[in-house]
Image (cartoon, grey):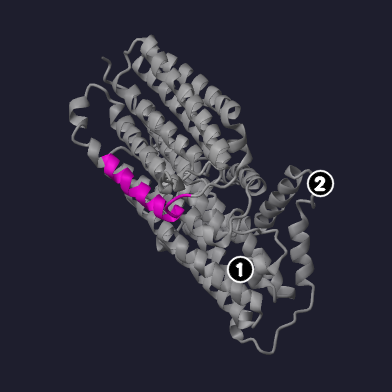
Amino acid sequence: MTALWTHFALNLAQVAFLLIFAPLVEGVLHRLEEIIQGKRGPSIWQTYRDIWKLFGKDEVISEESTWVFRFAPIVAFVMPMFVVLLIPALTAYPLFFAFMGDMVAVGFLMAVSGFFVALAGMDTGNVYAAVGASRTHMVGFLAEPVFIMVFFSVSYVANSTIPYFVNATWGASWGSMLQPSHLLVILAFFLLILADEGRIPVDSAAGKVEIAMIGHSKGLEYSGTSAALMKWGGTTKLMVLALVLVNVLVTPWGLAQHTQWTAILAAVGLVLLKLLVFVMVLALIETTLAKLRLFRISEFLAVAFVICLFAVSVRLVGLG
Amino acid sequence: MNTTVSPLAFSLDGSIAALFVVLGLGVMVSRQMLGSLRFFMWQSVALTASALVLADALQAINLLWVALITFSTKVIAVPLVLRWAAGEEIYGRREVDQALSISASVLVAAILALVGWFAVAPVLPILHGTPFALLNLPTGLIMVLWGAFTVALRRESVAQLMGLLIMENGAFFGSIAIVHNLTVIAEIAAAVDVPIVALVIGLLIRSIRRVTGTTRVGGMDTLHER
């Protein structure tokens, strides 16, 4: 097999890895949260069952809605698959899509999906969806400077924003892993994931009250296949962000160094282990913190912004 | 003095310094009294860790004492003393108010941090014999500035106490890198001050509360004699 076809197969393997394991990541997260709260919780396979069930259901679409409403679930489902082609999901060496986009492109692709989902929310005429869409954009608006600062500090440290290079820069030695600016960027990026994914303390993913929802009310009108795609897309989005965090920032090792299948399979196991640790931390945060009031989210993100500012200034004065 | 240190120890101390700053930010911005106290305790743990790393890298036995004293006074004694002296005020109340909004104070904190970085820059060439001063001195100075800012900003006596305590932490963080050959008795004298400060202010907080019914001291400057 030529190198081109090998890389193509590896890209497909990355997408398959994402699609197959994303619902499991969410299932484990739910189960862990329930266990921490002293309950038994649903099976870790529940998300697969939900998605399967939704695919088999009839779909109801409002006559008032336009093509945006039908198109948005497809965008939300496809975008994380594009993102996973750009980041080191299983391999430490760049595959051939790696140089088509950097971390800014990752942010851009995520923003496209967020934009369509927000538009679709407003398209339905559902009051809560419109409120949710505007709130999401408020949070997104506040998160924007933090995103930019994260990219800025990452590119300042690694001299590149291509995720594979960043991974290689930080994974080079313990000395480079423990740089202060690296630690600060990790912290800021983690706070960003909490905000962007609508996790506690920004938004409650398990909340059932529409008036208190931020991001989760946008998908209320979906049913059947569209709802399944939205749900699956939501899980892959969380997993992609977690992959960027664990593979590029926190633990940039344990990925396949060559193209042998054994190495790839070992990488699958190791990456899943890393994701398990991430999910445990997330579950711990979600169960121990309380949700912030809406107008205090700006404070949360201001803290993330200042942490990023430190990362840059530490580097600027030549310490990091 | 041993001026060659391994890059690993340097990076490790840098990461601890970064954590120290972030935890100090936590003390400043947390709205809840207990949260603020917990951030202070973790910050003191970071100070201990930094002292341990420096002790290992510079082969300074005194710094082991500093680590031990810091841990026992700030992580164990201060919370106990505060619980005894002003337990109801600290563990009973949740929210604290302040003169500036948190977002604004975070921005001011960022500016103070930049001031801290650049204010130390002219001094650093003199300190080339002490490699860790490059990291610890600016970090310590930032924390002293933030502590002063917290004291000025918060309208709450308990939160002002937190400001004083992080100022003290900052001063220690900077000084362990510059002077690590002090006699142990001096270290003990400096460190024992902290629980005493906590005790005195804690008792003061209790008496303020007994007289005025609140621990909010922000409005007291408007009181005047009849």
The residue closer to the viewer here, B193 or A103, is B193
- Label drawn at residue A2: none
The residue closer to the viewer here, A106 or A219, is A219
Along the horizontal axis of the image, is A294 left or right of A206? left
A40 is within the stretch colored magenta: no
Disc 2 target residue: A40
Q: Residues within 10 Å of mark 2 (few under 14, many from 20)?
A: few
Point out residue A27 in the picture as x, y percentages from the top left corner: 72, 53
Q: The C terminus of chain A appears in which quarter of the rendering?
A: top left
Point out residue A92 in the picture as x, y percentages from the top left corner: 47, 46
Question: Which amino acid is tagged 2?
Answer: Arg
Point out residue B135 in the picture as x, y percentages from the top left corner: 32, 32
Along the horizontal axis of the image, is B26 left or right of A20? left
User: What residue appears at the point 44 percent right and 43 percent down from the top-left corner?
Assistant: B25
B109 is within the stretch colored magenta: yes
Chain letter, disc 2 residue:
A
Along the horizontal axis of the image, is B144 left or right of A128? left
The residue closer to the viewer here, A57 or A201, is A201
Q: Is residue A89 visible?
A: no
Q: Which residues are magenta?
A: B98-117
